[in-house]
Amino acid sequence: MDGQSTTGTPAGLFRRLAAMCYDLLLLVALWFVATFAMLPLTGGEAILASSQGLLGQLYHALLLLLALAYFGLCWTRGGQTLGMKAWRIRLETMDGRPLRWGDALIRFTIGAVCLWLAVLGLWCLRAPGWTWRDLAGAALLLPLVVNLLWIPRGSAGQSLQDLVGRLCVLRLR
């Protein structure tokens, strides 16, 4: 803990989404640096698994590991990412202790799976006109929507990934 006290009230959906947007900008900046470092290995070509083979797959694994490292380090060292610090919220376990790496991995994995399914769902919904593919796309969006909308609906203000990991996101005074 960093000495700041919590109000005991859960952070609302708006604060969480704002912190996520802030963190997304920082994460994209990290990914730009990693991509820039990889470009000499491909001769300046786009890094795709289809054209670069194993190097492309390693690149995508590197991006995922960078995201895990950013969130995991921030969550286990004080319970706050930079976006969470800006919006004055902190992540901790239900008993008030900082997260361990296992807790961070569970939270990250659930969030990443929800986000990946939503991206696939949006990809399915991109074509004009209604097809069964659109129904599948809408179904793939549901886990992320339910995860986020559970925050204002739940009694403790937790998302589904908070419930699974037995975590809470609290507002700071």
Image: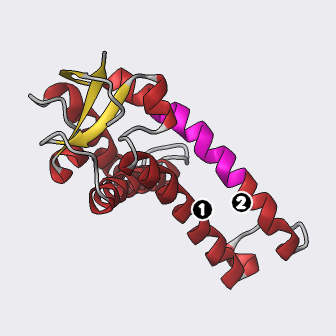
The answer to whether residue 121 of the structure is visible from this angle is no
Residue 151 placed where, x, y %? 22, 31
Amino acid beneath label 1: Leu
Amino acid beneath label 2: Ala
Residue 33 placed where, x, y %? 74, 54
* Residue behind mark 2: 34
The answer to whether residue 157 of the structure is visible from this angle is yes
- What residue is at 15 percent from the left and 48 percent from the top? 166
| CA–CA distance in space, label 1 to label 2 | 8 Å
Q: Residues within 10 Å of mark 2 (few under 14, many from 20)?
A: some
- Magenta residues, start to end: 20-32
In the displayed image of the protein, which residue is found farthest to the front?
Answer: 3
In the displayed image of the protein, which residue is found farthest to the left?
Answer: 155
Residue 165 vertical placement versus 89 (above, below): below
Q: Nearer the viewer, residue 26 or 137?
A: 26
Precedes in sequence: disc 1 or disc 2:
2
Residue 149 vertical placement versus 165 (above, below): above
